Image: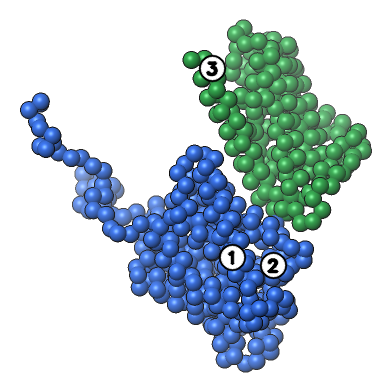
Chain colours: A green, B blue
Amino acid sequence: MSSTSTTSLKDLFLNGIIKENTIFKLALSLCPSIAVTNNLKNGIFMGLAVLFVQTMVNLTISQMRKIIEPKVRLPIFMLVISGWVTITQMLMAALVTDVYANVGLYIALIVSFASILARAEMFASKNSIVPSMVDGLGMGVGFLFALTVISFFRELVGRGTLTVPTGLATQHVFTFISTKPVLIMVLPAGGFLAVGILMAFFNWIDARYMKKAAHASH
Amino acid sequence: MEALKKEHQLIVSVSPHVKSEETTSRIMWTVSLALLPAFLAGVYFFGPKALLITAVCIVSCMVFENLYMKIVGKKPVAGDGSAFLTGLLLGMNMPASLWSFSPFTAHVPVIASFVAVVITKQLFGGLGFNVFNPALIGRAFALISWPKAMTIWNEPTAALLAMDAKTTATPLGILKEEGVAKLLEVFGDKMSLYQHLLTGNRAGSIGETSAIALLIGGLFLLAKRYISWHIPVSFLATASVIAWVFGGKGALFTGDPVVHLLSGGMMLGAWFMATDYVTSPSMRKGQIVFGIGCGFLTMLIRLKGGFPEGVMFAILIMNCFAPLIDRGFQAKVFGAVKQDKAKEATK
């Protein structure tokens, strides 16, 4: 979307987290953000998986951008993406077995993420390796951030606990509300509510920030 | 142009040019008044805790409305009565046992009020822009979040000072779990069952039990022309036909429509919830479609679904179809020719 010559690497990195946050700003990839975020640990690992795939796909496509025949670029992008998703799937199945049992289906679905294909098409295939990697990192960290916030909110309100991963195979469950949390928040309906509320909250912060910035520039 | 004096200028204003005496606030307070008989019946049968729960709902709805208005910097309009009405309806949709349910569950009405007023109404743009009925979303949220607390029903004690009462199943709960025979056994005979359902001397939400009081309120609104007959009549008629045809065990046409009409939230829903101006279609034909949909979905949930009662979900589902129904039954513009007919004429 933006060319590298005019934007610094830092702006490129922040772009994916704030200005073009996959979930809160572009409202893409909402399916996994609702399906796997009823538990903080699952949310974090899902976010990490997307971060990894996004960065590696951008890196690979950027490297290959001069030898890809433009007419068949989409199938080639898909091949690269599925390759990295398969690697992620195998890694997760081996390292974090219990998380994989819960989110495995959605890891496979990363193949069809609009944001990953979009970044490959619009950024990585037109830019050199370093900016492409930074762009992938930024988009991935933005996704990780969104999933962490959503799953934090949903697990805390809906179950009254927080499942924090302390290692690849270990976790610690903190209990905050022991009686009658708001059960709906861990159900699918609550996923939509949580995403909507957080999206509104971040847009509100953004609007206030823009207002201040506009005042400052005058 | 300068010669044109001020008194000769045409005054151009936006329609409507003739306004009636009716205001939003007057409608809201009249509907609240119409709910009063049913609410008093609820207080009579379930004791002072019914009054307390409804008071918590009304106060929190009004407080949340004012707080939200203050935060976003709009003029507070809690005086228009819409928050009061939402709170009253929400309170009447709660079980009276909420108060005695241990440990104390005051957070249920408070959070339900927040969801109703702030999330369902204000975040969608305020009164007039909400897609769903606020009080019903508040109740649905509470029912799904605290299924146990929201489905413990007290036996009506008819003792004004009793705080504790035995818990029991609602007539619909008995009907669903154990069938008509058990229902007749609990209430004696058929006439006694109808009598209990009509007066409201049965387990249920605070404001839904007294069918006769709700009917009085509904007919009052009808007589004052605040609501039209289209939604309630098509709602109740569809539900009773389905109850009669499919409600019986085994053979068709053996069901008892009266039990279905008088129990659960049917009366409260048909007269006061489905007729909400904002969330129902505005054209008469559309209102009939809306009512039929509500009746059909209610009976579908009651007879085939997992919940014993379906009025709340039926109305909420039809709420999302209201704009679509309105598009399907747009008013015919006077003098206008239908487009396809106009095309034919030019051929």
Residue A108 visible (yes or no):
no
Q: Chain of mark 1?
A: B
> Which residue is depicted at the point 68% across and 87% down?
B186
Residue B177: x and y in percent read 71, 77
Is B72 placed above or below B282 here? above
According to the picture, the residue beneath numbered tag 3 turns out to be: A216
Marks 2 and 3 close (CB-CB < 8 Å): no
Report the residue that reaches farthest toward the left.
B3
Real-space CA distance between mark 2 and mark 3, rounded to the nearest whole angstrom:
53 Å
> Which residue is depicted at the point 76% across and 32% down?
A47
According to the picture, the residue beneath numbered tag 1 turns out to be: B54
Residue A22 visible (yes or no):
yes
Residue B123: x and y in percent read 53, 44
- Residue B99: give its label: 2
Residue B208: x and y in percent read 56, 73
> Which residue is depicted at the point 23% across and 50% down?
B17
Say which label, 2 or 1, has the lower sequence index.
Answer: 1
Q: Amino acid at mark 1?
A: Thr
- Residue B91: give its label: none
Q: Chain of mark 2?
A: B
Residue B117: x and y in percent read 55, 52
Q: Quadrant of residue A134?
A: top right
Real-space CA distance between mark 1 and mark 3, rounded to the nearest whole angstrom:
49 Å
Q: Quadrant of residue B346?
A: top left
Q: Amino acid at mark 3?
A: Ala
